[in-house]
Amino acid sequence: MRVSVLLEYRLGLLIGAAGMIVIHAASVAGIWVVLRPVGALAGWRFEELLLCYGLLTTARSLEHTLADNLWVIGAHMREGSFDRFLVRPMDPLFYFLADRFNVDGLGTAAAGIVATTYAWVSLGIPASPANLAVALVAILSGGVVFVAINLMTATTAFWIVESVPITRAVHELHDFARFPLTLYGKRLEFLFTWILPFGLASFWPASRLTGRDASGVVWAAPFVAAALALLAYRFWRFGLRHHEGTGT
């Protein structure tokens, strides 16, 4: 239903998606400019960094497209419109997420897929079932990670109403995962692998695909994502029990 509404304003749809493509193109250009004088960053060439960027961006597009309503939960709290998600015969979280489909995320998806494909071809990575499985697991697990982390931070709206600053502060940390985690030392590498596991959608699969890592870390991504999603959902249910309507 949401897509049907958006299709009534096709120009706006195209502008939103195109805007995200331009933003990501500018980010990639920034990486290229930085690497141009030195050739590599911690031994990673531009195409290899682009692979990290592409995988992470594609994973993030799942949250951007399907779970964007989490960013505006505070507005629903203030206006009293959140209560309508509680009176339907379905899970409130599903109804809340399904209420908003953000077409800008399609631009993010396009940028991520193009970056990943270009890097993949440039690096000569074989399109074997194992390699494709690594990429698919990274993207899907990464999408769940993005949604779960945003859900946990957005749930604070049940107490503070305006949760965007917290959500943005934590969400923007994913920028660290656009680059090799080995740059940041062991503590931050651990943080972005197991606590805020954005690296499972970028650094680790890229390391596996480029032959740098032969460990099984990349295959831990679905389990880490599932555990994080369960924790986020439990926190959401806890927040629901403390929700107080506006009375309007």
Image: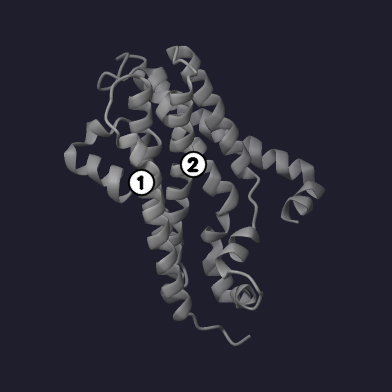
Circles 1 and 2: CB distance less than 8 Å?
Answer: no
Residue bearing mark 2? 140
Residue 16 placement, left or right of 240 = right
Image x and y of residue 171, in percent: 41, 50
Q: Residue furthest front?
A: 129
Q: What kind of colouring is applied to the model shown? A: one colour
Residue beneath the point at 48% across and 36% down: 57
Image x and y of residue 155, in percent: 44, 67
**Placement of the N terminus among the 4 image quadrants:** bottom right
Say if 70 sits above or below 83 in the image. Answer: above
- Label 1 Cα crowd, 10 Å radius (few <14 / some 14-19 / many 20+): few
Q: Disc 1 residue type?
A: Leu
Image x and y of residue 156, in percent: 41, 69
Q: Residue furthest left?
A: 186
The residues bearing labels 1 and 2 have C-alpha atoms spaced at a distance of: 19 Å
Residue 102 placement, left or right of 241 = right
Q: Earlier in the sequence, mark 1 or mark 2?
A: 2
Say if 75 sits above or below 141 in the image. Answer: below
Per the image, label 2 sits on a secondary structure element best described as helix
Q: Disc 2 residue type?
A: Leu
> Looking at this view, is 163 or 187 the one in front?
187
Per the image, label 1 sits on a secondary structure element best described as helix
Residue beneath the point at 73% across and 50% down: 3
Residue bearing mark 1? 173
- Label 2 Cα crowd, 10 Å radius (few <14 / some 14-19 / many 20+): some
> Looking at this view, is 63 or 168 the one in front?
63
Residue beneath the point at 48% across and 37% down: 139
Inspect this view and state whether residue 153 appears. Answer: no
Residue 44 placement: quadrant: top left
Residue 53 placement: quadrant: top left
